[in-house]
Image (cartoon, rainbow, N blue to C red):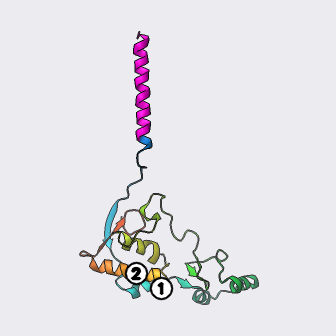
Amino acid sequence: MRSFPSYFATVFGLALFVVAFYTACSNAAPVTAEFTTCKRPARYPTLADIELQRIALWADYAKERDLALTTEQQTKLELTGDLVGELELDRPVKFPNGKTDLPQGWLPELPGDHPWTVNPETTEASFPAWLEVRVIDPLLFDPDSPTHLAWAQTYLEKTAALEDGMLTSYVGADSGCP
Protein backbone atom coordinates (compact mmCIF):
# COMPACT_ATOMS: atom_id res chain seq x y z
CA MET A 1 0.00 0.00 0.00
CA ARG A 2 1.24 3.46 -0.86
CA SER A 3 1.86 6.07 1.74
CA PHE A 4 -0.19 9.23 1.74
CA PRO A 5 2.67 11.45 0.47
CA SER A 6 3.34 9.05 -2.44
CA TYR A 7 -0.36 8.86 -3.31
CA PHE A 8 -0.67 12.67 -3.05
CA ALA A 9 2.33 13.15 -5.36
CA THR A 10 0.84 10.79 -7.95
CA VAL A 11 -2.57 12.51 -7.90
CA PHE A 12 -0.97 15.97 -7.93
CA GLY A 13 1.28 15.00 -10.86
CA LEU A 14 -1.69 13.63 -12.80
CA ALA A 15 -3.67 16.83 -12.14
CA LEU A 16 -0.78 18.96 -13.43
CA PHE A 17 -0.61 16.81 -16.55
CA VAL A 18 -4.34 17.23 -17.19
CA VAL A 19 -4.13 21.02 -16.73
CA ALA A 20 -1.08 21.27 -18.99
CA PHE A 21 -2.72 19.07 -21.66
CA TYR A 22 -5.99 21.03 -21.55
CA THR A 23 -4.14 24.36 -21.80
CA ALA A 24 -2.07 23.14 -24.75
CA CYS A 25 -5.17 21.82 -26.56
CA SER A 26 -7.25 24.92 -25.96
CA ASN A 27 -4.52 27.10 -27.50
CA ALA A 28 -4.09 24.87 -30.54
CA ALA A 29 -5.42 25.87 -33.94
CA PRO A 30 -8.75 24.27 -34.80
CA VAL A 31 -8.46 21.01 -36.65
CA THR A 32 -9.98 21.03 -40.12
CA ALA A 33 -10.28 18.30 -42.68
CA GLU A 34 -7.68 18.18 -45.39
CA PHE A 35 -9.02 18.16 -48.93
CA THR A 36 -7.00 16.32 -51.53
CA THR A 37 -6.22 18.25 -54.67
CA CYS A 38 -6.22 16.76 -58.14
CA LYS A 39 -5.49 17.84 -61.68
CA ARG A 40 -7.98 17.82 -64.53
CA PRO A 41 -8.37 19.55 -67.90
CA ALA A 42 -9.94 22.99 -68.20
CA ARG A 43 -13.32 22.85 -69.97
CA TYR A 44 -13.88 26.34 -71.41
CA PRO A 45 -11.28 27.68 -73.89
CA THR A 46 -13.12 30.92 -74.84
CA LEU A 47 -15.51 33.49 -73.41
CA ALA A 48 -18.08 32.34 -75.99
CA ASP A 49 -17.87 28.82 -74.52
CA ILE A 50 -18.42 30.24 -71.03
CA GLU A 51 -21.36 32.37 -72.20
CA LEU A 52 -23.12 29.26 -73.50
CA GLN A 53 -23.51 28.34 -69.82
CA ARG A 54 -25.08 31.66 -68.84
CA ILE A 55 -27.94 32.08 -66.41
CA ALA A 56 -31.36 32.23 -68.07
CA LEU A 57 -33.04 35.62 -68.18
CA TRP A 58 -36.64 35.58 -66.95
CA ALA A 59 -38.18 36.79 -70.23
CA ASP A 60 -36.36 34.13 -72.27
CA TYR A 61 -37.07 31.40 -69.72
CA ALA A 62 -40.81 32.21 -69.56
CA LYS A 63 -41.10 32.44 -73.36
CA GLU A 64 -39.21 29.17 -74.03
CA ARG A 65 -41.46 27.32 -71.59
CA ASP A 66 -44.65 29.18 -72.54
CA LEU A 67 -45.28 29.93 -68.86
CA ALA A 68 -48.66 31.31 -67.89
CA LEU A 69 -48.59 33.31 -64.67
CA THR A 70 -51.55 33.77 -62.38
CA THR A 71 -52.90 37.29 -61.97
CA GLU A 72 -51.26 37.48 -58.52
CA GLN A 73 -47.89 36.33 -59.90
CA GLN A 74 -48.06 38.80 -62.79
CA THR A 75 -48.89 41.64 -60.36
CA LYS A 76 -46.04 40.68 -58.05
CA LEU A 77 -43.61 40.45 -60.97
CA GLU A 78 -44.63 43.93 -62.13
CA LEU A 79 -44.36 45.41 -58.61
CA THR A 80 -41.23 43.70 -57.28
CA GLY A 81 -39.46 42.52 -60.42
CA ASP A 82 -39.16 38.90 -59.33
CA LEU A 83 -40.95 35.71 -58.35
CA VAL A 84 -38.15 34.23 -56.26
CA GLY A 85 -39.32 31.09 -54.49
CA GLU A 86 -42.73 31.05 -56.16
CA LEU A 87 -42.11 28.94 -59.25
CA GLU A 88 -40.84 25.42 -59.80
CA LEU A 89 -37.79 26.04 -61.97
CA ASP A 90 -35.72 23.57 -63.95
CA ARG A 91 -32.59 25.79 -64.06
CA PRO A 92 -31.33 29.06 -62.52
CA VAL A 93 -33.18 32.21 -63.62
CA LYS A 94 -32.33 35.91 -63.33
CA PHE A 95 -35.38 38.13 -62.86
CA PRO A 96 -35.78 41.72 -64.17
CA ASN A 97 -34.74 43.22 -60.80
CA GLY A 98 -31.45 41.26 -60.87
CA LYS A 99 -32.40 38.66 -58.26
CA THR A 100 -31.74 35.05 -59.13
CA ASP A 101 -33.61 31.89 -58.22
CA LEU A 102 -32.40 28.31 -58.41
CA PRO A 103 -34.21 25.01 -58.30
CA GLN A 104 -33.98 23.46 -54.85
CA GLY A 105 -30.78 21.41 -54.52
CA TRP A 106 -29.36 22.81 -57.76
CA LEU A 107 -25.99 23.77 -56.29
CA PRO A 108 -24.78 21.00 -53.98
CA GLU A 109 -23.75 22.13 -50.51
CA LEU A 110 -20.12 21.74 -49.57
CA PRO A 111 -18.90 20.48 -46.20
CA GLY A 112 -18.52 23.37 -43.77
CA ASP A 113 -14.73 23.11 -43.72
CA HIS A 114 -14.30 22.85 -47.51
CA PRO A 115 -11.98 25.51 -48.97
CA TRP A 116 -14.69 26.62 -51.41
CA THR A 117 -17.30 27.55 -48.79
CA VAL A 118 -15.77 31.00 -49.26
CA ASN A 119 -15.07 32.15 -52.80
CA PRO A 120 -11.35 31.69 -53.48
CA GLU A 121 -9.22 34.67 -54.43
CA THR A 122 -8.49 34.92 -58.14
CA THR A 123 -4.81 34.37 -57.30
CA GLU A 124 -5.44 30.93 -55.77
CA ALA A 125 -4.52 27.87 -57.83
CA SER A 126 -8.01 26.39 -57.46
CA PHE A 127 -9.82 29.53 -58.68
CA PRO A 128 -10.36 28.34 -62.29
CA ALA A 129 -11.76 25.00 -61.11
CA TRP A 130 -13.98 26.77 -58.56
CA LEU A 131 -15.36 29.05 -61.28
CA GLU A 132 -16.18 26.06 -63.46
CA VAL A 133 -17.74 23.99 -60.66
CA ARG A 134 -19.59 26.66 -58.70
CA VAL A 135 -20.49 29.29 -61.36
CA ILE A 136 -20.18 28.13 -65.00
CA ASP A 137 -21.25 24.46 -64.88
CA PRO A 138 -24.35 25.16 -62.72
CA LEU A 139 -25.49 27.81 -65.26
CA LEU A 140 -24.97 30.78 -62.91
CA PHE A 141 -22.58 32.77 -65.10
CA ASP A 142 -24.00 36.26 -65.69
CA PRO A 143 -22.30 38.12 -68.55
CA ASP A 144 -24.04 41.31 -67.40
CA SER A 145 -22.13 41.15 -64.11
CA PRO A 146 -18.80 43.02 -64.11
CA THR A 147 -17.59 40.60 -61.40
CA HIS A 148 -18.46 37.53 -63.45
CA LEU A 149 -16.81 39.02 -66.54
CA ALA A 150 -13.65 39.78 -64.56
CA TRP A 151 -13.68 36.24 -63.16
CA ALA A 152 -14.09 34.82 -66.68
CA GLN A 153 -11.19 36.92 -67.97
CA THR A 154 -8.99 35.75 -65.09
CA TYR A 155 -10.07 32.16 -65.74
CA LEU A 156 -9.15 32.42 -69.43
CA GLU A 157 -5.78 34.02 -68.65
CA LYS A 158 -4.94 31.40 -66.02
CA THR A 159 -6.01 28.43 -68.13
CA ALA A 160 -4.13 29.74 -71.18
CA ALA A 161 -0.99 30.03 -69.05
CA LEU A 162 -1.16 26.42 -67.81
CA GLU A 163 1.73 24.48 -69.30
CA ASP A 164 -0.06 21.16 -69.10
CA GLY A 165 -3.60 22.54 -69.48
CA MET A 166 -4.56 20.96 -66.17
CA LEU A 167 -6.49 22.78 -63.43
CA THR A 168 -5.97 22.27 -59.71
CA SER A 169 -9.22 21.20 -58.09
CA TYR A 170 -10.44 19.24 -55.08
CA VAL A 171 -11.39 15.58 -55.05
CA GLY A 172 -15.04 15.15 -54.14
CA ALA A 173 -16.11 18.71 -54.92
CA ASP A 174 -18.15 17.62 -57.98
CA SER A 175 -15.18 18.94 -59.89
CA GLY A 176 -14.57 16.23 -62.45
CA CYS A 177 -11.90 14.63 -60.28
CA PRO A 178 -12.22 11.00 -59.23
Task: Estimate how packed mark 1 is, as few (under 14), some (14 to 19) or many (20 or more) residues with alpha carbons within 10 Å.
Answer: some
| Three-letter amino acid code at the position of disc 2 | Ala
The secondary structure making up most of the magenta span is helix
Instruction: Give the magenta part as a residue range.
Output: 1-24
- In the rendered structure, does residue 8 fall within the stretch colored magenta? yes
Q: Residues within 10 Å of mark 2 (few under 14, many from 20)?
A: many
Q: Position of residue 76 (x, y in %)?
A: 72, 82
For the point 63% across and 89% down, which residue is it? Answer: 66
Q: Tell me which corner region of the image, top left, top right, bottom left or bottom right, holds residue 59.
A: bottom right
* Res 39 label: none
**Residue type for callout 1:** Pro
Q: Contact, CB < 8 Å: mark 1 with mark 2?
A: yes
Q: Residue furthest right?
A: 71
- 164 w.r.t. 144: above or below: above
Q: Position of residue 73 (x, y in %)?
A: 72, 82
Is residue 64 rendered to the left or right of residue 48? right
Quarter holding the N terminus is top left
User: How far is mark 1 from mark 2, CA to CA?
Assistant: 9 Å
Q: Position of residue 67 (x, y in %)?
A: 65, 86
Q: Nearer the viewer, residue 157 or 63?
A: 157
SS class, disc 1 = loop
Q: Residue at x 38, y 82 (%)?
A: 153
- Residue 129, by quadrant, is bottom left
Label 2: state its secondary structure.
helix
Identity of the residue drawn at 76% across and 85% down: 71
Q: Position of residue 164 (x, y in %)?
A: 24, 74
Q: Which residue is mark 2?
A: 152
- In the picture, residue 83 is in which quadrant? bottom right
Residue 155 is inside the magenta segment: no
Of labels 1 and 2, earlier in sequence is: 1
Q: Which mark is residue 143?
A: 1
